[in-house]
Amino acid sequence: MRIAILFLGSILTYFPALAQTHAPSWEFGIRAEYGRDYYHKEAAPMGSYEGSNIDFSSSRSWGAGFYFERSLNPRWSVMGQVGYAQKKVHPQLFHEYNQTASQHLLREVHHRSAVDAGFRLYPNPQSKIRLFVDGKLGANVFMSVVQHERTLGRIVRGNVFGFQRVAPVASASLGIKWSRLTVSAEYRDDLTVSKRVGGMSEISGRGVFGKVGFALFRGGM
C-alpha cells in the first residue's frame, strides 16, 4: 500500500512538471472527408406514413473544411472543426417518395454545414506516428436541397422540405497522425430527430466517413 501511495504521489508531482516542460502548441489546417450517411425515417403522430419505417442511405457524401487543435499536454488536446458537405440521395426519399414524380428527377443533392468541438487523446505521444481517439459534440445545419428535373432543370428548395435545419450531433474518431498529416475514420450520430413542420414525419441520421487533414500553420504558446 505504501508503495502504491508513493507511486501515485510521484505521478501527481511529475504530471504538472511534464505539462510545463512541453509548451502548449497549436495548429490550424484543412480537412476533407468521404463516406456515407444512413437515415431512418418514420411517421410522427400526425404523419401520413401509417407507422411504416423507411431506412435508406446516401449514395455518396463528401465534404471539406478547416480544423483547429491545441495541445493541453503531450497526451491531450482540444480541437474544433467547421465544414461544408454535399450528400447525394435518391430523389424524394428524404421527403415523400413518389414513384411517378421520381422518374422525372435525375438526382437530388443536399447541402449542409457543420461545426463541432471536443477532446483528442494520444496514447503514444512520443512516437513519430501517433495514434489517437477523439470525441466531439456539434451541430449539423441543413442548408438547402437541389433537385435536377428532366425538363425543368435545376430546382433549389430552400425550405429543405419543411424539416428542422439544425440538429445536434456527436462523433467519435480513430486515426493516426504523422507530422502534418492526419488520417482517420469517424462515426457520427444525430442526438435528436429532425421533425417536419406540421408534425408529418421525422428523420434521424448517422454516418461513417474517412477523413484526411493537413496542418497549414503550427506554433507554440
Image (cartoon, rainbow, N blue to C red):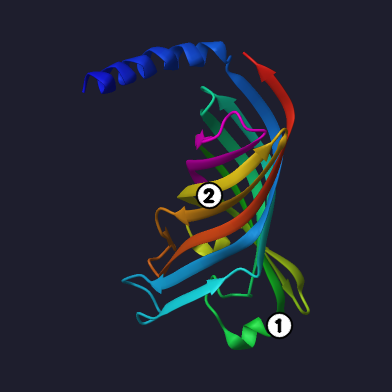
- Where does label 2 land, which residue? 140
Against 121, is 32 above or below? below
Q: Residues within 10 Å of mark 1 (few under 14, many from 20)?
A: some
Q: Residues within 10 Å of mark 2 (few under 14, many from 20)?
A: some
On the question of residue 157 being in view, the answer is no
Q: CA distance from mark 2 to mark 1?
A: 30 Å
Identify the disc placed on residue 82: none
The amino acid type of the residue labelled 2 equals Asn
Q: Main secondary structure of the magenta part?
A: strand
Residue 61 lies in quadrant: bottom right
Q: Secondary structure at mark 1?
A: loop
**Magenta highlight range:** 119-140
* Residue at point 54%, 60% (across, down): 207
- Where does label 1 land, which residue? 104
Q: Residue furthest left?
A: 1
Residue 7 lies in quadrant: top left
Is 157 in front, or is 221?
Answer: 221
